[in-house]
């Protein structure tokens, strides 16, 4: 990619995400209808001047729901990704620098986390929750759980990256100049590990968006009548299963397109590799 | 050129990595004050291990080190990290083989050299002046715009000179140059060698020049030692070693140098 | 040339169909949604096991699923004594098990001793065991059996439709069989193959031994979408219990194959937790135990919208526990609950509730809100819940929907009682209310809103208990009907269950399957399995 093209792509991505964020934050004003309002006379309708993206099976305006879903997902999926990456980075760094007992314990914990039957644990969590949690509380908790579960894989990657950095030429050179271990770690190792950590973050965001959709199956995550990208993607799944003429229902793919473009823009804006 | 007979560094080392075979086996080498000594050997012969061992940078979790490193009569093995740090960069400095990968990619040049200065200076504010003269001495610009650059914006030659500048900032007694010229073109290489030579002649800095290229070592060292399988197999004046190698390994090493014209 | 052959073949097919001459042979293929949990017919409690029991088991008396009347099967005749404490059955002569061994009265009593064995814990034995003084089986002679009861009893012969007679000579409870088929091959997790019982007692009017089919292959196929795809590809012959969405999809693709059989007996209902010991705040218990509150909720729900939006019209607003499909037992005097927000709000304000700024408050000022649990992953229930949520918002009640996985849901409604309200469906396999005793008796474990009471907590529950006793013991059919009419009336007046809709029975039948007469009652398309035949039995479905 040439520099000019790259700049333009970054500009376009920033503009798109800014528009999306503003629309999502101002959802109450931008959306033509309340997201939970049911127009029961026009269920599963095609796009029209009244309903720009048609209506869902309960007659709710899909465009309004998509905007409100964006507010939920665009805010909380990155927050969960941040949580899991912060946990992963702490564990990964500790395991890379403290070999021996602590490092082994941490990596053992990561292995256990990766192999745990999380479905059962999530079911347990659901059963311990009060039933009348608000959709927002349920959502926040869901992502907190995802974050808590999601640390193990990235922690291994970050640990490996840091171990590699610790024996790299520039780190040895820096120590050869008489710098303290802590200074070398903070100013030379960590900044170089940033792209790895960032990559873990950006790959976690879309995964969490989708994971949330599956958690709603367990009664966690976004519950009716709220909408998230996950639940809207799930609607698409039923349309796919119905196997009708998909081209006649292209609008159903609007949420998927939005998720795809958003994640694309995020990766353009925050590339996971430093270009050399 | 000062060549006093006082030993600057006396090495008697065995290093082996856990689970692996011995890398240095009763390696013995003495470097005199102000000496320019070339250490030649093929890759894998333990050269880089030696450089790290002298600076106390071998990973003690993986490598076991025995013997002694006497630097100006002081035993370095067994020093604490703080004492090691006061030696690294100030008394003994290191220039690594790949200049580009030896500079921290995420730090600006100015920050790196300031950090190198402040590591051993009681006058941290003077870094600008001090570094300017050193940078000038290696033929690098000293202005702000240069110091704001990132390593990736330098050519290989400039990066190597910048690394050398940081190494000699505190006028060390010994400079360990580990394959500093291997990635350079012939012109840049000769410039760097000149820089080392002038360091040696002006400040009396002893240089341990580690290379796989016996020809380069011979071209500017007072003495060359041949490393094979973790031990010195031969050492002496360049002309003697090259023209009349005693050891079989040295013969092979010498004949592996197509550029060298014995005639 | 090829076209001509096809046309000729089609003509041949039409000609065959025209003649309506049943063809023997062929394998009928269909899918079941889960592995049958227990092949011992006495222990069948899940739908796949019950289906296998229906297809393989021989019963004394069979209910015709279409006419809803009892027909003689292994018993030719039956009669009660005047005290209605003994049911005497005369067995068919010359009947043999699938392994060729003869069938006689000893087998019937063997079956009952197994069924009534407390260690077996047979679900279908529950009505027999709940008889005061118990049930005993006596062999009178090789062809005569008497069932003796500790108290006068009614309609017990209907329960025999669930009792597959087992051989007294066999250790294997599932073999040999007296029904049209026997289990010949079982691949756990994959399929079950049933083979024709060569000794099946029944013959067609023209004298051909039944069944016509050689075998039935039941593929275990959890995913109903895949079931549909396979049906469309000609790999499956029949689909039972289609949901409305799949029905609509199939209708657009193969309009000739789907049938909406009309209102079924299955109900969808919502109930509030009225258990005194439930771990709920006291003010919520006051709401849930208020009849006016429950009635207001019932009146605020738009049942027609549920039928139309969620079930695409393949459901009908429910009247009560008996659907209009059950002609014999429906209390026609009860009106379908109607949407009436004004009446709902009047009831609420009459019981001290106040609507302020769109939020309903109780007398003490608590905002009225409750959580509604339902089984997660059931799309139509989740959609119903969303409609109810929107409906109740109009009378100021905030509903939180909490879909739970099935075991967690069952745990809450049967053990911890930690829930406000629940939305679930009930499958009614029998038309006679005797089968619902567990639900209506206040001591019953399935008396969901307040189960297993030691004595009835309300006068109306006490009255239901008395009426159900009449239903269970009264000889006179009209008196039984009157008693259960009263039960329906009490339920309508007190709304312990808020009945929402009755689903329609939706099935699909491949054109190749002949003599299919799908019925609303389970097993729908398969109830006359011994008379089904395939137009082209030799054709092996492509796989």
Image (tube, coloured by chain):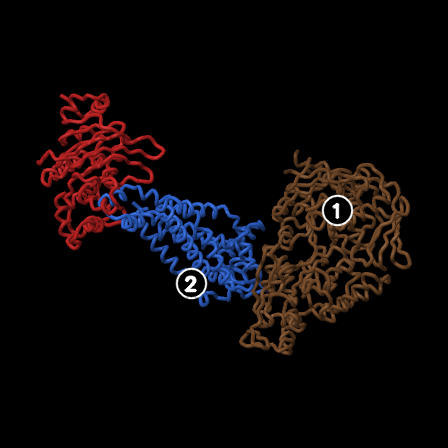
Chain colours: A blue, B red, C brown
- Left or right: where A188 falls relative to B215: right
Residue C228 vertical placement versus A58 (above, below):
above
Residue B224 vertical placement versus B206 (above, below):
above
Label 1 SS: helix
Viewer-nearest residue: C344 or C84: C84
Residue B218 vertical placement versus C79 (above, below):
above
Residue C323 position by quadrant: bottom right
> Badge 1, how many Cα within 10 Å: few under 14, some, many 20+?
many
- Left or right: where B252 falls relative to C305: left
Residue A176 vertical placement versus A131 (above, below):
above
Q: Indicate the position of residue A84 as horizontal and vertical percent values.
A: 42, 53
Q: Chain of mark 2?
A: A
- The residue indicated by pointer 1 is C41
- Left or right: where A95 falls relative to C524: left
Viewer-nearest residue: A74 or C518: A74
Viewer-nearest residue: A188 or C3: A188
Q: Indicate the position of residue A122 as horizontal and vertical percent values.
A: 53, 54
Residue A218 position by quadrant: bottom right
Q: Residue at the left extreme?
A: B1
Q: Quadrant of the C terminus of chain A?
A: top left
Q: Indicate the position of residue C482 as horizontal and vertical percent values.
A: 81, 66
Q: Which residue lies at the image location 21% right of the left edge and 27% below the top edge?
A: B226
Q: Chain of mark 1?
A: C
Q: Which residue lies at the image location 81% right of the left edge and 54% below the top edge?
A: C158
Q: Which mark is residue A23?
A: 2
Badge 2 and badge 1 both on one subunit: no
């Amino acid at each position: 990619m040439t520099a000019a093209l790259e700049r333009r792509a970054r500009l376009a991505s920033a503009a798109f995400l800014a528009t999306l964020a503003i629309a999502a934050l101002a959802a109450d004003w931008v959306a033509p209808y309340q997201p939970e309002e049911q127009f029961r006379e026009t269920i599963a309708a095609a796009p029209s001047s009244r309903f720009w993206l048609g209506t869902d099976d309960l007659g709710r305006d899909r465009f309004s729901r998509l905007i409100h879903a964006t507010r939920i997902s665009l805010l909380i999926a990155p927050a969960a990704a941040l949580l899991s990456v912060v946990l992963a980075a702490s564990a990964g760094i500790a395991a890379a620098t403290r070999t021996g007992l602590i490092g082994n314990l941490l990596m053992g914990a990561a292995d256990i986390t990766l192999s745990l039957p999380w479905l059962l644990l999530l079911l347990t969590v659901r059963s311990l929750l009060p039933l009348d949690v608000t959709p927002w509380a349920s959502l926040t908790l869901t992502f907190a759980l995802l974050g808590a579960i999601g640390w193990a894989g990235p922690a291994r990657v970050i640990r490996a990256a840091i171990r590699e950095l610790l024996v790299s030429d520039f780190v040895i050179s820096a120590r050869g100049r008489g710098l303290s271990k802590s200074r070398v770690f903070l100013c030379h190792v960590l900044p170089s590990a940033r792209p790895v950590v960032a990559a873990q973050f950006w790959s976690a965001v879309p995964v969490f968006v989708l994971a949330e959709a599956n958690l709603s199956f367990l009664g966690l995550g976004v519950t009716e009548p709220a909408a998230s990208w996950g639940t809207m993607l799930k609607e698409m799944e039923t349309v796919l299963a119905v196997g009708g003429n998909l081209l006649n229902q292209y609008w159903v793919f609007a949420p998927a397109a939005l998720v795809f473009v958003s994640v694309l823009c995020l990766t353009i804006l925050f590339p996971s590799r430093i270009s050399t | 050129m000062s060549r006093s007979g006082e030993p600057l560094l006396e090495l008697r080392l065995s290093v082996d990595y856990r689970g692996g075979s011995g890398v240095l086996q009763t390696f013995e080498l003495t470097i005199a004050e102000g000496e320019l000594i070339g250490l030649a050997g093929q890759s894998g012969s333990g050269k880089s291990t030696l450089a790290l061992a002298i600076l106390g940078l071998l990973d003690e979790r993986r490598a076991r080190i025995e013997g002694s490193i006497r630097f100006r009569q002081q035993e370095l093995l067994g020093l604490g990290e703080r004492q090691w740090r006061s030696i690294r960069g100030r008394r003994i400095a290191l220039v690594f083989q790949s200049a580009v990968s030896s500079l921290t990619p995420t730090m600006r040049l100015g920050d790196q050299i300031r950090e190198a200065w402040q590591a051993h200076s009681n006058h941290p504010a003077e870094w600008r002046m001090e570094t300017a003269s050193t940078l000038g001495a290696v033929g690098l610009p000293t202005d702000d715009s240069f110091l704001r650059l990132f390593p990736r914006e330098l050519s290989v030659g400039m990066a190597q000179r910048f690394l050398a500048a940081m190494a000699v900032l505190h006028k060390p007694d010994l400079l360990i140059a580990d394959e500093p010229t291997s990635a350079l073109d012939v012109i840049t290489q000769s410039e760097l060698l000149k820089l080392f030579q002038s360091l040696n002649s002006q400040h009396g800095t002893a240089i341990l020049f580690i290379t796989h290229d016996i020809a380069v070592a011979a071209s500017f060292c007072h003495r060359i030692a041949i490393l094979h399988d973790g031990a010195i197999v031969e050492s002496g004046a360049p002309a003697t070693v090259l023209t009349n190698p005693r050891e079989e390994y040295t013969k092979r090493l010498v004949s592996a140098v197509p550029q060298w014209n014995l005639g | 040339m090829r076209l001509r052959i096809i046309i000729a073949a089609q003509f041949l097919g039409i000609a065959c169909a025209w003649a309506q001459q049943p063809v023997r042979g062929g394998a009928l293929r269909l899918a079941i949604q889960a592995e049958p949990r227990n092949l011992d017919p006495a222990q069948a409690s899940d739908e796949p096991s019950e289906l296998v029991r229906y297809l393989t088991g021989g019963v004394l008396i069979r209910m015709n699923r279409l006419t809803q009347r009892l027909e003689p099967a292994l018993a030719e005749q039956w009669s009660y004594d005047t005290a209605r404490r003994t049911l005497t059955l005369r067995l068919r002569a010359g009947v043999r098990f699938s392994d060729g061994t003869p069938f006689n009265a000893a087998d019937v009593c063997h079956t009952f001793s197994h069924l009534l064995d407390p260690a077996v814990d047979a679900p279908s034995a529950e009505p027999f065991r709940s008889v005061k003084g118990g049930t005993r089986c006596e062999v009178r002679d090789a062809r005569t059996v008497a069932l003796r009861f500790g108290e006068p009893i009614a309609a017990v012969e209907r329960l025999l439709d669930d009792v597959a007679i087992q051989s007294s000579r066999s250790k294997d409870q599932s073999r040999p069989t007296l029904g049209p088929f026997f289990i010949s091959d079982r691949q756990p997790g994959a399929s079950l193959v049933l083979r024709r019982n060569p000794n099946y007692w029944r013959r067609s009017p023209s004298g051909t031994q039944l069944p016509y089919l050689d075998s039935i292959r039941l593929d275990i196929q959890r995913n109903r979408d895949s079931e549909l795809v396979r049906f469309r590809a000609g790999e499956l012959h029949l689909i039972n219990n289609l949901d409305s969405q799949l029905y609509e999809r199939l209708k657009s693709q193969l309009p000739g194959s789907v049938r909406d059989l009309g209102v079924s007996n299955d109900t969808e209902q919502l109930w509030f937790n009225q258990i005194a010991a439930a771990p709920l705040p006291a003010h919520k218990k006051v709401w849930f135990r208020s009849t006016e509150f429950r009635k207001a909720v019932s009146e605020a729900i738009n049942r027609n919208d549920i039928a139309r939006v969620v079930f695409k019209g393949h459901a009908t607003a429910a009247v009560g526990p008996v659907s209009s499909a059950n002609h014999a037992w429906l209390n026609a005097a009860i009106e379908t609950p109607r949407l009436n927000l004004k009446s709902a709000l009047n009831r609420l304000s009459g019981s001290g509730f106040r609507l302020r700024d769109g939020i309903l408050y109780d007398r003490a000022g608590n905002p009225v809100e409750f959580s509604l649990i339902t089984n997660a992953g059931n799309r139509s229930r989740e959609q119903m819940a969303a409609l109810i949520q929107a409906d109740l918002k109009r009378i100021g009640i905030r509903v939180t929907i909490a879909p739970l996985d099935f075991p967690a849901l069952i745990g809450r409604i049967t053990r911890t009682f930690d829930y406000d309200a629940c939305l679930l469906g009930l499958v009614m396999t029998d038309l006679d209310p005797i089968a619902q005793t567990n639900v209506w008796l206040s001591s019953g474990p399935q008396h969901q809103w307040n189960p297993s009471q030691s004595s009835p907590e309300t006068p109306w529950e006490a009255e239901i208990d008395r009426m159900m006793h009449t239903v269970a013991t009264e000889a006179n059919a009209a008196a039984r009907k009157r008693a259960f009419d009263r039960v329906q009336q009490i339920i309508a007046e007190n709304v312990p269950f808020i009945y929402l809709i009755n689903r329609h029975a939706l099935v699909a039948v491949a054109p190749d399957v002949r003599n299919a007469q799908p019925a609303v009652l389970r097993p729908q398309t398969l109830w006359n399995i011994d008379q089904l035949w395939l137009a082209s039995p030799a054709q092996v479905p492509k796989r």
